[in-house]
Amino acid sequence: MKRRRVLFIQLSQFRLFIRKLVVAVVMFSALGLLILSRADSAHLGKAEDIVSKMLNPIIRVLQLPADGAYFCYEGVRDVVRVYYDNKILKQRVETLSRLNSKNQSLRIENELLSQMLHYTPPPEATFVTAKIIAGESDVFSHSVIAYVSEKQNVQKGQVVLDNQNVVGRIESVHGNYVRILLVSDINSKIPVLIERTRGRGILSGNNTDTLKLLFTGSNSDIRLGDKVVTSGVGGIFPSGLTIGYVSKIYTDAVDVKPASMIDMIEYVKIVSYGLNNTLLKENEAR
């Protein structure tokens, strides 16, 4: 019993010593931090340099596994990315190869058919640019006057475009001035077709902003938004030129909205397609 009591007393004294030691360490630490906070910054900087030099090698060693793992991850990701990119490129090469083979066969077939039919391609279109200097837009007529050079060989019947869309044709030439009959003029009658269905008709102006598509068959299957292009019938307008789009459909007629804003044009292209205006000359001869 006496030994147990002595051991208990010794443990109590040891615990008390530890507590006092902890208190002393905390106090001395606080005092040290207080002294360091008031000390010269140069000494603090030196201390930081010493600590950094001691810790940097350790930090670098600890970072090596992480850097190695990241490097391996990046390498694997690049390999996977290259694999998928290579797969996509192979598919594209195969597709292009098939298309090239198909185009080559079509080119050869076209050359053979051209030789068999003695096909002669039409002459390339030539055009001149003209500025609109006057306009006539009322209930009786829709036309404009443009200025051209006498050396540009502008002739009656040539097609007039605003960019790529038909806006009219040359009605008369007087020196440097030409009169352009717009597609919206009541005297304008153009053979056209619906691009989607190839249904034919006559596009007539009525001195308003809307054109009328006449003489279309009941089975034309015309829809709103259908593109209306020249049919090439008559020898004045070549086929495939855009004039407008279907805006309204009636029982016996169809409204067509011009593709170009005719009342706002400032410059036009007068185009010669080398058709020699065959029908126009025949009508004049009669």
Image (cartoon, rainbow, N blue to C red):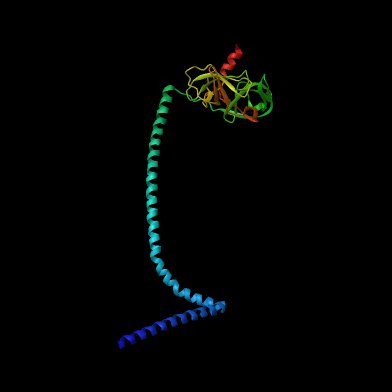
Q: Nearer the viewer, residue 14 or 259?
A: 14
User: Is residue 261 at least partly visible in the picture?
Assistant: yes
Residue 135's spot in the image, x, y percent?
68, 25
Answer with the quarter of the image where residue 101 lies: top left
Residue 279's spot in the image, x, y percent?
57, 16
Answer with the quarter of the image where residue 157 lies: top right
Residue occupying the point 40% across, 68% down: 62
Q: In which quadrant is the C terminus drawn?
A: top right
Residue occupying the point 49% across, 80% down: 27
Q: Nearer the viewer, residue 139 or 269?
A: 139
Name above or below for residue 209 compared with residue 84: above
Q: Nearer the viewer, residue 196 or 105?
A: 196
Q: Nearer the viewer, residue 58 or 237?
A: 58
Q: Is residue 193 left or right of residue 3?
A: right
Residue occupying the point 36% across, 86% down: 9
Q: In which quadrant is the N terminus drawn?
A: bottom left
User: Is residue 231 at least partly visible in the picture?
Assistant: no
Residue occupying the point 39% across, 31% down: 105
Name above or below for residue 18 compared with residue 91: below
Which residue sits furthest bottom?
2
Answer with the quarter of the image where residue 283 lies: top right
Total marks drawn?
0
Q: Is residue 268 left or right of residue 230?
A: right
Residue 254's spot in the image, x, y percent?
55, 20
Which residue sits furthest top?
286
Residue 267's spot in the image, x, y percent?
64, 30
Q: Is residue 6 left or right of residue 236?
A: left
